[in-house]
Amino acid sequence: MNDILNTTVHRLIKGLNNKEFSSREITEAYCENIRRVDGDIGAYITKCTESACQRSSTIQRNGNSLFQGIPIAIKDNFCTKSIRTTCGSRMLDGHIPVYDADAVKSVLKEGMIILGKTNMDEFGMGDSGENSAFFKTKNPIDKTYSPGGSSSGSAAAVASRQAPIAIGSDTGGSIRLPSSFCGTVGLKPSYGRISRRGLISFAPSLDCCGIISKDVLDSSILLSALSGYHGDMTCTKSEFTVSSDVDNGIRGMTVAIPKSIEKIVYDPDILLVFENLKRILEKNGAKIIEFDLFDSDASVAAYYVICCSEAASNLARFDCIRFGNKPKEYNSLDEIYVNGRSEYFGNEVKKRIMLGNYSLSYGYGREYYSNAVNFKNKLFEYYRGIFASCHAIMLPVSPSHPFLTNEKRTSLEKFKNDRFNIIANLGGFPSISLPCGRHKSGMPISLQFMGNTFDESTILRIAKNVEGELK
Amino acid sequence: MTNKYEAVIGLEVHIELNTKTKIFCGCKREYGAPPNTNVCPICLGHPGALPLLNKKAVTYAVMAGTAMGCNINSVCRMARKHYFYPDLPKGYQISQSTLPICTGGKLTIHTETGDKDIDLIRIHIEEDAGKLIHRDDYTLIDHNRCGSPLIEIVSSPCISNSKEAVLYLQGLRTLMTSIGISTCKMNEGEMRCDVNVSVKKKGDTINGTRCEIKNLNSIQFVGKAIDYEIKRQIKELENGGVIKEQTLGFDEKSSACFIMREKESAADYRYINEPDIPPFYISREAVSEIKANMPELPNEKMKRYMAKYSLSHYDSSVISSNKGLSDYFDRTAKHTEHYKTLANLLLGEYKRLSTDEDFFCPIPVENTADLCCLVFNQKLNSSNAKKIAYMMWNEGKKPRDIMIEHKMEQINDEGALIIFAKEAIDKSPKLLSDYKNGKKQAAKAIMGAAMGKSGGNANPKKLELIVENLLKELTSEN
C-alpha cells in the first residue's frame, strides 16, 4: 500500500492489522507531508511531528484498540497537557495546559498519535479562518479561497493530506462549514454526546466536539471512541456504538427538505446538487417530504445573541492574572484588565464580547437574551415535531459559494450565511455534512443530514448510503 | 434610640459548609493549608475546566432549609453572577438566581419579651471566592478557599434591633452546628454576615434608604455596628439630612462604621443560568429521607429537656444551644437521675473549665454521674464539688477517690456543726459584739470562720442556720 496519504482511517487500520505497513510508516508519511506542505497551507499552529514520529516507532499494535498507531490532528481549542494550546488567540499564545481534554484523553487512550494543534478562528468566533491571531489558513483545493472556519486548520489538514482525520468543534457550523469548503466529511454529534471538559468554551450551551474525516465510516468509528467520557455534567453517560444496520441502506426512510429552498439559497450550483441528492434518495427507496424552516431570520438572531452572551461570560476569566499574557503596561487593577484584554483579544472577539454584555445588561439589551433563550426552546420543540414524521432533515451547509480569502463581507452577511448550520446547534441535534458535488469553479459543495437528538446512527446510515452512491 | 423611629434590619449570612471537598471539584477543604495547595484547573478557572456539582453540598442546603421550615424547590438551577475581581478566577461566581434550593422558612428567637419569628426569604448554594492578602506594594491571592461551598441565608427585613440580630445569628449558629453542616467559626470566616439597615418614622409604611455593612467577623461586632448605624441614621435625619445609599465597613477599635464605597447604582451582575450545570431535581422522597435522618434540632432538644428532665426554661435553652454541652448532658443522663444537679454542674464549673467555644469535657460521663450523686446526696458541698471537678478535669481520677484522698466528705452531723460554730464564735469576740450591735453581716464572717474550722467540709446550709440560731440565742441572752 503505497498511497498512505490518500487512505481512509478504516483502511489504514486494516493495513496495520495485516502488517502491510507500520504505524511508523503512516506517521512518517504524514509528518513528511506536513513538512512539505504546511508552510504554504498553514493548517497547524503547533506541529508535534518529532514526538509523533518518536511515539509511532515505539507503539506496538496489540489489538487493544482499533485506532492504535493512527495519527490525528487536534483543533487548538482542546487542552493538550504539556502542548501549547492557543485557541487561535494572542491571549493564550504561550499557554500550556496542565491537563488533557476528555476528547484528547480518549484519543490517547486509543493509542492515537497527535500530529499537532490546528489553526482556528480566535476562540471559535468566525467562519473563515481569517480571525486567527497567527496566520490565515489557505484552502488546499484552491488557495485563493478561504477554507471556512472556525475549524479551518483541521479541515485543511485532512483535505491537504496532513492528517488522516481530525478533531474540531462546532458551535454554529464550525465543523460543517470548513468541511464543506475543503471537501471533507464533517460530523457534529448531538450536544452532550462527547464530553466538553477541556474544550475551551465559546458558547457552552451550543459547543460540540466533532470529527473531520475523509469518509463517513471514519467519523462513525471515531465517534464511538470519543463518546461516553465524562467530566462534563451536560454530557450523556451512554456510549455510542456504530449501529449494525449502518449499511442497510435507506429504503423506507423519510427525509424532510425545506420548502422553497430556492428562495434562501443564493447559488444555482448548490440548488442543482440539492436536486440531485433528492433524486438519489428517492432512487434508493427513501420518501421525500417538505417542511417549513422555523423562522430562519430569528434563528440567526437568536443564535448570535446567545453565543455572544455566553462568550462574553466565558471569556471573563481571561483577566491576565492567573494564566495567559500580561499587558505590557499597567498602573492599576483596572488597567490590568483593560490593557491586557484590549491588547490580546482580536477585533471579532471584542465585538462579540461587547454584543454579549449588551444583551445581558439591564436597561440595555437584557430582553434580547431572554427572548433568544425562549426562541431556542421553541425551535427545539418545533424540530422535534418535524422528526416525529421523518428520519432526518436534509439541508444545505452554505447557501453560497465559498468566499475568497480576503473577501469583504459585512458582519450581517457573515451571520446570515450560517442560517442552515445553526439549527443543529440551537436544537442540539446531530448533523453530518458530506461533499455532494462541485461548483462550476471546481470548489466543493456539501449538504448536511440533521437527525433527532442522539440519533447519530440514522444520519450516519443515510450519509453512508449517499456517499456510496456518489462515488 | 429616639422613640420616634424604628429600624428595619435584614441580614445576609454566608455559612461555609462542612463538606470534605469543594462545591464544583474534588479539591480538599482545609483551613490553614499552605497557599494555593488545594487547587485544580476547575477552582482556578482554567480554560476548558468544567464544574461538577457536589451532591453533599446540595444535601446540606436541603438540611438547612428543612431545619427552618423552608419550601424545598423541586427544580433548581445554578446561575453565573458576573463581576471582575482578582479573587474570582472565572470572572463570575456560580451561585443561584431564580431557582434557589429553598424559599421561605423562619428561625424563632427567644427574646426577653418573648419568642419572635424571623422570616427568611431564601437559602441558596454558591461557591466561595479566594482570599486576598494585601501587602504594601502588592497583593497576593490564595485560591485554597476558592470554590468552597457556601449557603447564603437571606432574612426578610423584619429584625428591629441589634439584640434581635445577635439572637438570630446565635440561633443560626446553634442550628447549623447542631445539624452538623458547618462549624460556623466566625473568626475563621466560616460564618459571615452582611447587614442592611434603614430607619423610618414609627408607623411609616415606606422604608428609608438602606446602608449595607459588610465584613463583620464576630456576632458581637454585628450588634455594635447595628447600634452605631441606627444612631447615625437617626441623627442625620433629625438634622434634616438625607441618608445616602452606601456600603459601610465596621472599625472594631472605634466601634464605628466607615464608608467603603458609595453605591451609585445597583451592580448589574448580568445573571445567566449556568449552562455547564443542567437543572437539578430534588425529589420529595429525597426531602423526606433527609428530614427523617435529621439530627434533633435545638428547639426539640430544649422541649425534651424541659419535659423529660424537668429542667428549667433557661437551663434547657442554654444546654440545647451548644452541641458539645447537649451531647455531654445526654450521655451523662444515661448514668444518673439527678438532672438538675447535672445541669448546674455543666453550666457552672464545667462550662468555666472548657475553654473551647464548642464545649468539650475530658471527664468520663460515669465520673460526672458519680459526682452528681455525691452532691445530690449531700456528701459534698458545692465548694468541694467545684474543687473535685477541677481535679477530675486535670487528673482523670474518680470523684470518690479524690473525696477520700483529700478528706472532703461533707459534714452533716448537727452536733459536729454546732461545735464548729461555737469555736468560731469563741475565737472572734469582736465579730460577736459587732453582731450584737446590729451589724448582721458579721454573721457571714463567723460563718466563714466556722467553715474554716470544719476544714471546708461543713454543710453550708445547715451551718448557716446553726450559726444564725446560735448568734440569735447569744444576742437574746443579753
Image: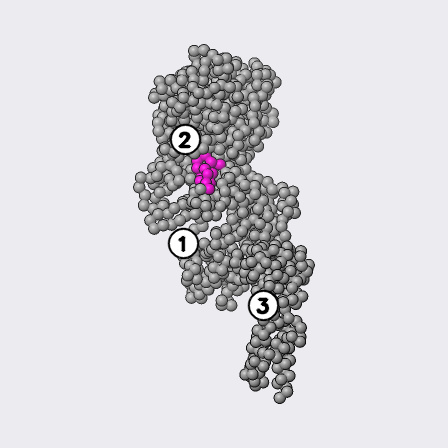
Q: Nearer the viewer, residue A69 or A372?
A: A69
B112 on left or right of B231:
right
The answer to which quarter of the image holds residue B101 is top right
Q: Label 2, label 3: how many angstroms apart (C-alpha)?
A: 72 Å
What residue does disc 1 label?
A: B261
Asked if residue B362 is positioned above or below residue A410 in the image, the reply reads: below
> Contact, CB < 8 Å: mark 2 with mark 3?
no
Residue A289 seen in the current view: no
Question: In the image, which is nearer the foreground, mark 3 or mark 1?
Answer: 3
Q: Looking at the image, is mark 3 or mark 1 earlier in the sequence?
A: 1
Q: Is residue A235 visible?
A: yes
Residue at point 59%, 65% (across, down): B406
Verify CB contact (< 8 Å) between mark 3 and mark 1. Answer: no
Query: What secondary structure is marked by label 1?
Result: strand
Q: Which residue is mark 2?
A: A82
| Circle 3 SS class | helix
* Distance Cα–Cα, label 2 vs label 1: 44 Å
Report if residue B363 lies within the magenta region.
no
Q: Which residue is mark 3?
A: B383
**Would you say the magenta stretch is mainly helix, strand or loop?**
loop
Please name the colour scheme applied to the rendered image. one colour
Judging from the image, mark 2 belongs to the subunit labelled: A
Left or right: where A344 falls relative to B463: left
Give me the chain letter of mark 3.
B
